[in-house]
Image: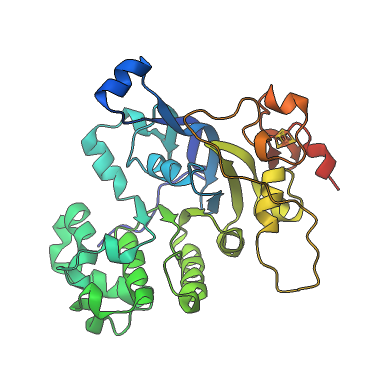
Amino acid sequence: MIDHSKAIKQGNLVEVRNLKKYFPVQKGYLEQILAGRVDYVRAVDGVSFDIRQGEAFGLAGESGSGKSTIGRLVIGLDTPTEGQVTFDGIDLSTQSSEEMRRLRRRMQVIFQDPMASLNPRMTLGEAVSQGLKIHFAELANQHREMVMRVFDRVGLTPAQYFYNKYPHQISGGQRQRVVIARALITQPDLVLADEPIAMADVSVRALLLDLMVQLKKELNLTYLFITHDLATAKYICDRIGILYLGRMAEVGDLPEVYSTPLHPYTRALMAAVPVPDPHERRTTLMPEGEIPNPINPPSGCRFHPRCPYAQAICSQEEPVLRELRPEHQVACHFAEQFLE
Ligand code: SF4
């Protein structure tokens, strides 16, 4: 049998320090000669945060904020340009490919598009047992039973019915449950959930989130939950980091950040979340324009071209993350104005 015990220290499961990821911009040969330099997209540009054992840590921001790139770096699917990711005390940059392969059993992914991440020629049983073949080959005679158990756990019942089906023969919500089952089959400690319900029907989104909350409790999972939708993050996350153009704008306990958002960007994102009461007034201005080009980000505070509160210093000095309230950090020169 598999040993279910998890030898994880209390405290941080993941520590991310000054993480950077730059992608070279593809140019034509002549263009490159004329430019005389290589330009880089600074997708992630000096981000630090911790993920505590057993929590759901959310990363939120607009498209282009760098959240998915950070997710891939945290679970070792990509290597950083600079900085460090530590998982359960292990610096990922020191691991050989064989060591990374073993470590991957403990770090699994739920991507947003289940159809794209399931092989249409594999039955659901075969797809989910792939991880067992890699990480628990010695238990081959138990694989079928293990897949059945995980199907039961994610609500694919009767498990026997689903085992021999193909992805196109089930609904979108059921496919996402298969993807969750595939992530759980190796008994991971950390699950990266990258917009896991973004492609699901509205009618099943709450059910999938409920399932993820329940699995987190039952299996003592730790989530890195990536989303552009603050309403979804509120449902599942214990703490949240708000990203803007590859930098952390604000990070803290979720109820604290939601009750007292201290960064103008967070306040604008929250103003965009629909509320059920039509009489509730919104006083925060939405930022104008689009997220700037990450090849050449604005000087000083990267949010200053869109910020309704910007002053002269904002285009000159980059604000650093500082703790203004317990368990609540913000990178803004003028965040004090939002303290209650
Ligand atoms: Fe706005 Fe200035 Fe704060 Fe940046 S530092 S968010 S530009 S007020």
Residue at horizontal 66 percent and vertical 35 percent from the top: 305
Q: How is the image coloured?
A: rainbow
Q: Position of residue 303 (x, y in %)?
A: 64, 37
Say which quadrant the N terminus sits in.
Answer: bottom left
Residue at horizontal 31 percent and vertical 43 percent from the top: 103
Q: Position of residue 66 (x, y in %)?
A: 48, 41
Q: Which residue is the extreme one toward the top?
A: 36
Residue at horizontal 25 percent and vertical 37 percent from the top: 99
Of the four image quadrants, the one with ligand 1 is top right
Residue at horizontal 29 percent and vertical 58 percent from the top: 186
Q: Position of residue 299 (x, y in %)?
A: 61, 25
For residue 98, above or below residue 55: above
Side (left or right) of 198 relative to 135: right
Toward the viewer: 88 or 332? 332
Whether residue 327 is visible here, answered yes or no, is: no
Toward the viewer: 132 or 6? 132
Toward the viewer: 98 or 293? 293
Where, by quadrant of the figure, is residue 174 drawn?
bottom left
Toward the viewer: 175 or 26? 26
